[in-house]
């Protein structure tokens, strides 16, 4: 837009594209720098543009990147069990969404605690308590006292995507910043394919955040 008076960022939901308009005299660099600062807003738009996928009988959800059908059988065990291509859940149907979420949280905690321990050993550092949660747009965080908190939703993603976040947080046990030394350690812990894993998380993120929401 040639005669725009100010910078504006708009999200077009149908095409899934972002449109940046800026005054003709403003440099591209300034406009792009401003747009990059709007990342939280952009992520929120992207997340709300993806339909919610509530947990229900017959619904297909990815677990560790593999599609599984939520199979409900009132006579099956209440605690969901991973089977071939499915997640078998028993008990009353109205409690099914809650039980699926509890199962995924416990599964996420078990797998990611083991991965934190593996990466911490590689980094020769002691990890504090590991916990899982569902904090907004963050996939993970590491506190100065060594506690690592990860989004349980990472268990939905393919293993290499999940491990990238785990390696990233373990590298923070050594460096509480994103400097050169941090990046070198993160790359050493994760190994090949870091950029690809990062890009996959960006791409999959909006859907992962919508799974299990809505009714
Ligand atoms: Zn970080």
Image (tube, rainbow, N blue to C red):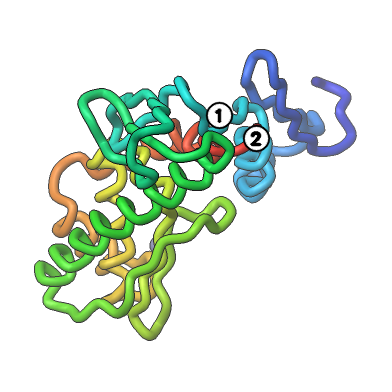
Q: Seen in the image, is 36 located left or right of residue 188?
A: right
Can you see residue 187? yes
Identify the element where label 1 is drawn: loop
Q: Residue furthest bottom?
A: 145
Q: Residue 72: x and y, percent? A: 42, 28
Provide the secondary structure element on which disc 2 rests. loop
Residue 135: x and y in percent read 55, 58
> Does residue 107 appear to the left or right of 132 in the view shown?
left
| Residue visible at 25% across and 63% down in the picture | 113
The reply to whether discs 1 and 2 touch (Cβ–Cβ < 8 Å) is yes
Residue at image coords 38%, 26%: 71
Camera-side residue of 148 and 131: 131
Kindly indicate the quadrant of the structure image that contains residue 148: bottom left
Quadrant in which the C terminus appears: top right
Q: Nearer the viewer, residue 187 or 77?
A: 77
Residue behind mark 1 = 53
Q: Position of residue 132 (x, y in %)?
A: 41, 61
Image position of 144 with respect to 52: above or below: below
Residue sitting nearer the eye, 67 or 34: 67
- At 20% from the left and 55% from the top, the residue drawn is 187
Label 2 sits on residue: 214
User: Quick check: is the Cβ at mark 2 less than 8 Å away from ligand 1?
Assistant: no
Instruction: Indicate the position of residue 134 as horizontal and vertical percent values.
Output: 52, 55
The quarter of the image holding the N terminus is top right
């Amino acid at each position: 837009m040639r005669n725009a008076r100010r910078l504006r960022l708009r999200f077009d939901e149908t095409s899934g594209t972002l449109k940046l308009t800026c005054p003709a005299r403003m440099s591209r660099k300034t406009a792009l720098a401003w747009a990059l600062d709007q990342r939280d807003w952009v992520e929120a738009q992207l997340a709300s543009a993806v339909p919610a996928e509530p947990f229900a009988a017959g619904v297909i959800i990815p677990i560790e990147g593999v599609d599984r059908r939520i199979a409900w059988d009132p006579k099956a065990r209440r605690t969901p069990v991973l089977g071939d291509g499915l997640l078998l859940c028993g008990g009353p149907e109205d409690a099914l969404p809650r039980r699926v979420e509890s199962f995924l949280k416990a599964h996420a905690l078990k797998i990611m605690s083991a991965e934190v321990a593996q990466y911490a050993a590689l980094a020769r550092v002691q990890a504090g308590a590991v916990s899982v949660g569902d904090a907004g747009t963050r996939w993970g965080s590491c506190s100065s006292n060594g506690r690592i908190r990860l989004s349980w939703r990472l268990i939905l993603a393919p293993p290499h995507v999940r491990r990238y976040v785990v390696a990233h947080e373990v590298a923070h046990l050594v460096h509480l910043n994103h400097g050169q030394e941090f990046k070198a350690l993160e790359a050493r812990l994760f190994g090949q394919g870091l950029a690809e894993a990062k890009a996959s998380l960006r791409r999959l993120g909006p859907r992962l955040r919508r799974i299990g929401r809505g009714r």
